[in-house]
């Protein structure tokens, strides 16, 4: 292989990054274990600390001061992932470096740049996908949530108390998100602000309808129980409809992923037929333009298919 030295350097660098991460994980786990042992010796029982020692604190502190760090922090808070902006940034940079060397070694050095750009987009797409996944999970729990709120308000409980009770009875993500709302209400936030912030983290039409119903009922009073009962039935029907539509579109979504994979397969076949063919192709300006145009068309096709198959209720 002509690119064996470059591949060796890339694999070595990736191994070093993984080794550093492993050392950080081991040291954090060991420190936490020692803290637990000391607490057990003092109290005679093991208490849930609920705290994980963070890695890359210096990077995290500096990153949070920037606009990029604030955007990453807002996205991470909506994903529910137990990771800091600094950790995400370091892991993403390590992944981009690994993609650059691996793609440059397997295909050609020019493809390493394209792989790094695709990895940068993939990092943002990963967070967006996690937000969508968490939103979908919350939407699936909305019928149960409205049922709990209806039963609690019918029993004479205040809406704030009903939300706190729902946060204890529901699993994540609804339980965690409602706990945030309950904590905000406990420190003096208004019900409208806390619920609107919930909609901002998990934007969906179903949640917007529920929040609007709760806010209007809290302002003007009225028959909130009957409204929640009717909303529960509607959400159950919408849940089944979304599930059926997603099943019908699953094949199209797989096609959107397989088309770019086939393109990469064709490149490997071309390079295997004549060693160095991709190097010769990307060595000329015309070849680089052709590769960029082809990659853009594949990305455009992937984007359009995902937009067309997105379920909009």
Image (cartoon, grey):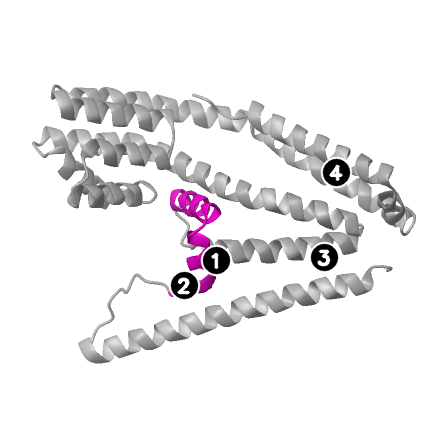
Do the CB atoms of the residues marked 1 and 2 lie less than 8 Å apart? yes
N-terminal label among 2 and 3? 2
| Residue sitting at x 73%, y 50% | 112
Q: CA distance from mark 3 to mark 4?
A: 21 Å
Main SS category, magenta section: helix
Q: CA distance from mark 1 to mark 4?
A: 33 Å
How many C-alpha atoms fall within 10 Å of the one at disc 4: few (<14), some, or many (≥20)? few
Secondary structure type for disc 4? helix
Residue carrying label 2? 54
Residue carrying label 4? 262
N-terminal label among 1 and 4? 1
Q: Based on the picture, tell me whether residue 29 belongs to the magenta stretch.
A: no
Q: Which residues are magenta?
A: 53-79
The mark tally for this picture is 4
248 on left or right of 297: left
311 on left or right of 145: right
């Amino acid at each position: 292989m002509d690119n064996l030295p470059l591949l060796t350097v890339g694999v070595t660098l990736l191994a070093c990054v993984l080794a550093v991460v492993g050392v950080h994980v081991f040291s954090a786990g060991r420190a936490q274990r020692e803290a637990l042992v000391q607490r057990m010796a003092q109290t005679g029982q093991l208490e849930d600390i609920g705290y994980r020692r963070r890695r890359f604190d210096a990077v995290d502190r500096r990153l949070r001061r920037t606009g990029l760090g604030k955007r990453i922090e807002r996205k991470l808070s909506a994903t529910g992932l137990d990771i800091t902006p600094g950790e995400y940034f370091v892991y993403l940079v390590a992944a981009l470096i690994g993609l650059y060397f691996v793609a440059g070694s397997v295909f050609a050095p020019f493809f390493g740049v394209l792989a790094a750009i695709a990895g940068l987009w993939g990092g943002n797409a990963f967070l967006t996908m996690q937000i969508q996944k968490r939103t979908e999970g919350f939407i699936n729990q909305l019928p149960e949530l409205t049922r709990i709120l209806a039963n609690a308000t019918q029993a004479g409980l205040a809406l704030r108390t009903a939300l706190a009770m729902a946060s204890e009875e529901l699993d994540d993500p609804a339980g965690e998100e409602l706990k945030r709302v309950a904590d905000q209400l406990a420190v003096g936030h208004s019900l409208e602000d806390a619920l609107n912030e919930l909609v901002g983290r998990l934007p969906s039409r179903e949640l917007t309808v529920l929040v609007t119903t709760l806010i209007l009922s809290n302002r003007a009073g009225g028959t909130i129980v009957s409204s929640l009962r009717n909303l529960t039935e509607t959400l159950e029907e919408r849940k089944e409809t979304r599930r059926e539509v997603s099943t019908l579109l699953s094949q199209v979504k797989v096609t959107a992923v397989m088309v770019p994979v086939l393109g990469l397969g064709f490149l490997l076949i071309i390079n295997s037929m004549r060693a160095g063919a991709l190097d010769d192709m990307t060595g000329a300006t015309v070849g680089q333009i052709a590769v960029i145009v082809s990659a853009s068309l594949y990305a455009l096709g992937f984007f359009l298919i995902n937009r067309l198959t997105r379920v909009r209720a």
